[in-house]
Image: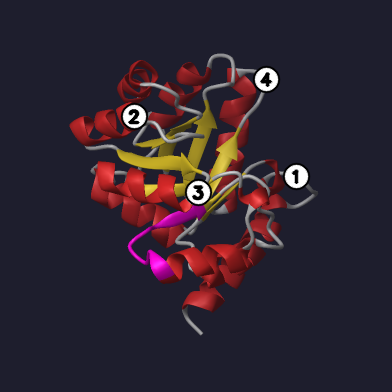
Amino acid sequence: MTSGSADVRRAVIDNAVIGIVRTTDADDAIVKARQIWDAGVGVVEVALTTPGGLRAIETLAAEAGDGRIMGAGTVLDAATARAAVLAGARLLVTPTLAPEVIEVGLRYDVTTAIGCATPTEMLQAKSLGADLIKVFPASRWSPGSLKDVLAALPQLDCVPTGGVTPETAADWIEAGAVAVGLGSALTKGPDPAASVAKLLAAIKALRNP
């Protein structure tokens, strides 16, 4: 079972997609997370803005393994980060630069994806020990601007999130992102598994031309 920070970081990069679940109740979050897993995306985060989000994470973490990884999203502080880890989260995702969440991740050997809006924040998060840089909101960026930043700061492992769609995901990967974060776009439509398969195939084709 994948558990250590380095292993989870590698799984995020190999998967190239983090599925994001943000709903109005824990039971719906559990259903949607399972749908994303079943569609072929192995890394899923449940946003802690979801009522009962920690309960959902605990339930899903018990089902993880065999390439399935459970994460917690919208982690804002050390107390919430620790609660998520104790519930079974192996990935902590923040919307903002949160040094205390990085510290919890380092203490418990849990991967962190830290939200940053500027190159200065990105480099600071990396210097503090963040495993991944969540470029958020990606809607304020473009693949071209991310490519320019990575030309100067190639040590950053960036995960654009917020405004990324299945249609644009491959553009971000081509620009140098190691993964992308997507939410409801992964489960909407009549055949989510088929659309996810198409998305993952496009990313794989970029990585293995």
* Cα gap from disc 3 to disc 2, whole angstroms: 19 Å
Helix, strand or loop for disc 1: loop
First reached walking from the N terminus: tag 4 or tag 3: 4
Residue at horizontal 50 percent and vertical 36 percent from the top: 45
The label shown at residue 101 is 2
Helix, strand or loop for disc 2: helix
Q: Is residue 151 above or below residue 194?
A: below
Q: Nearer the viewer, mark 1 or mark 3?
A: 3
Q: Nearer the viewer, mark 3 or mark 2?
A: 3
The label shown at residue 24 is 4
Q: Residue type at mark 1?
A: Lys
Residue at horizontal 54 percent and vertical 14 percent from the top: 52
Residue at horizontal 32 percent and vertical 26 percent from the top: 85
Q: Magenta part of the protein: which range?
A: 152-159
* Cα gap from disc 1 to disc 4, whole angstroms: 16 Å
Foreground residue, 195 or 176?
Answer: 176
Q: Residue type at mark 3?
A: Thr
* Cα gap from disc 4 to disc 3, whole angstroms: 31 Å
* Cα gap from disc 2 to disc 1, whole angstroms: 31 Å
Helix, strand or loop for disc 4: loop
